[in-house]
Amino acid sequence: MKKWSKLSKILTLGVTVLMAASIFAGCGDEKKSADSGKSSNVAEDVAAIKKRGVLRVGVKNVTKGFGYQDPATGKFSGLEVDLSEALAKKLGVDVEYTPVTAATRTALLDSGDIDMVAATFTITPERKNSWDFTTPYYTDHVGVLVEKASGLKSLADLKGKVVGVSSGSTSAKALVKAMIDAKIIDGEGFDSKTFDAATWNKGVSFKQYADYPAISTALTSGEVQAFCVDKSILAIYCTDDRTFLKEQFAPQEYGLATKKGSGMSKVAEEAVQGWLKDGTIKKLEAKYGLDK
Ligand code: GLU
């Protein structure tokens, strides 16, 4: 069964698919105030989801292996989709997926349009001030994709270049930190807490985009010379005429995110703990080729 969500229409984010759990039982503004994602009542949110009969989850729709929506069928697949579906099953409700980006996921969680984010969402100390994260279920690394014709091979070659990143992502800060650690740039003026991709221009600079397809287009047109984000996200854009720089860096631990102090935080954490113990996560990694 397919239905258009009000939200998707408003944000023109694409379709939201509602699937019966029994059949196919699935910016982030870093500078939020400490309680921006707080749930109004700890116990009531889970009761409300059960009453509604639907768990609403924000997932990626262009990240194969994690959250991907088949354009032909509208069907979502990926490890994060399966985890969301399993969580809905645990609660005895259906699951509804809303496509999110790094730039939209936290606003949708804060507004209550979704109950949970399962979208390659890296756990960081800053983000933990605003939202609850489960124990990590997967660790990726940040990588850099370039056109083969550019001749760029390593981080050192990025000096003076413009790099495309997603708004609301950890990517720009991770790249600058990696270049400083490798002594490619000196790090003067770098402060992890106040870093801003929009204004950083020492040794490398950034253009921020609303989504990944836009960065891929910008890489082709030469508007940016490199595309930086988690390697799992980059995989789909690594076409024959492109290659990764040799370095990968900044481990990215993915957690399910929920409103701070909410009942859903507890439910999600217990579920992830269970899946890590009983081998569910390992099985899903193998199913989606994420264990290589
Ligand atoms: N995982 C990184 C982050 O949470 C990259 C952005 C993304 O998930 O799209 O910032």
Image (cartoon, helix red, strand yellow):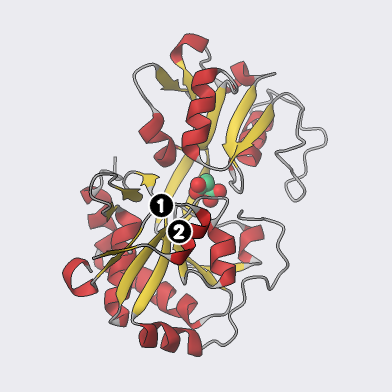
What kind of element bears circle 1?
loop
Q: Which residue position is annotated with label 1?
A: 14
Q: Residue furthest right?
A: 189
* Cα–Cα span, label 2 and label 1: 6 Å
Q: Is residue 218 left or right of residue 191?
A: left
What kind of element bears circle 2?
helix
Q: Neighbour class for label 1 at 10 Å: few (<14), some, many (≥20)?
A: some
Q: Where 19 falls versus 8 (above or below)? A: below
Inspect the image, locate mark 1, and give the three-letter code of the amino acid beneath it.
Gly
Say which residue appears at 49% left-offset and 20% top-offset: 220
Inspect the image, locate mark 2, and give the three-letter code of the amino acid beneath it.
Ser
Residue 105 visible, this orientation: yes
Nearest the eye: 58 or 264 = 58
Q: Is residue 106 left or right of residue 52?
A: right
Q: Position of residue 15 (x, y in %)?
A: 37, 55
Residue 88 is labelled as none
Label 1 near label 2: C-beta < 8 Å? yes
Q: Is residue 260 left or right of residue 20?
A: right
Residue 255 visible, this orientation: no
Q: Where 132 falls versus 49 (above or below)? A: above
Say which residue appears at 30% left-offset and 52% top-offset: 78
Q: Residue furthest left?
A: 23
Q: Where 227 falls versus 105 (above or below)? A: above
Residue 8 is labelled as 2
Q: Position of residue 93 (x, y in %)?
A: 30, 79
